[in-house]
Image (cartoon, rainbow, N blue to C red):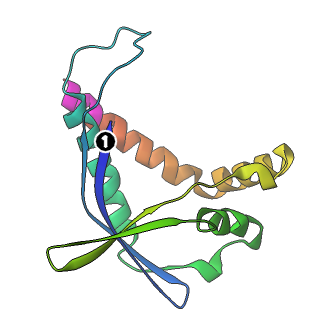
Amino acid sequence: MNVNAILNVTEDNYYVYVNIPSIYISNTKIVNDKVGMLGRNYDELLTLFMGMAQEIINEQFKTPYDFRSLDPSIMFFITSVFRNPRISPFYLDNFIYLGISYQFDFAMMTHAEKKVVENRMLAEHGDKLTKVYNIAMDHIQKVLA
C-alpha cells in the first residue's frame, strides 16, 4: 500500500500550524487474509477513510497548536520523532521539496512509564478518540452498504 499525502507544517515560536490539502491511498494488496475479506476497491475505501481523518485534522488545526502547553513528561515523544530525521531534497516545478523520513523509539521508557502516558492520554482525549472512531465507522458502513 502506498500513502501519498501532502502535509504542510509550519512552526513559529513553538506554535505549529498543520494543513493536509490532499491524501490518497494506492496499490493496496491483501497479503494474508485470515478473516475472509470481501473483494472491494480498498484503495478507494482507505482513501475515503483517510480523507475523513484529513478533514478532522484540518478542522482541529485551524488555529495553531502551542507546543509549550504540552506536559513535560511526554516531550520525550516529540523529541524522539525529530531526533534523527533523514532529509532528501529534490527540485520540481520551481519548488524545492524535502522528503523526510524518521523513526522513533519508545525504548527510553519503561513499560510502567508507557502505561502512565497511555492512561493519561486516554483520560484526557478518550472522548475525542471515541468521536473520531464513531464518525469513521458510520462513514465506512455507508460506503460498504
At a point 74% along the width and 54% down the height, the residue shown is 117
Three-letter code, disc 1: Asn
Disc 1 is placed on an element classified as strand
At a point 31% along the width and 36% down the height, the residue shown is 138
* 117 in the magenta segment: no
Residue 108 image position (x, y, % from top left): 80, 55
The C terminus - image quarter: top left
Prevalent SS, magenta region: helix
Residue 62 image position (x, y, % from top left): 35, 75
Tell which of 123 and 58 is nearer to you: 58
Specify the segment rendered in magenta: 140-144
The relative height of residue 65 versus residue 87 in the rendered view (above or below) is below
The relative height of residue 66 versus residue 116 in the rendered view (above or below) is below
Left or right? Give the position of 120 relative to 6. right
- Looking at the image, the residue that sits furthest to the bottom is 13
At a point 42% along the width and 48% down the height, the residue shown is 132
Residue that numbered label 1 is attached to:
2
* Label 1: how many Cα within 10 Å (few below 14, some 14–19, many 20+): few
* 141 in the magenta segment: yes
At a point 58% along the width and 56% down the height, the residue shown is 125
Residue 120 image position (x, y, % from top left): 72, 55
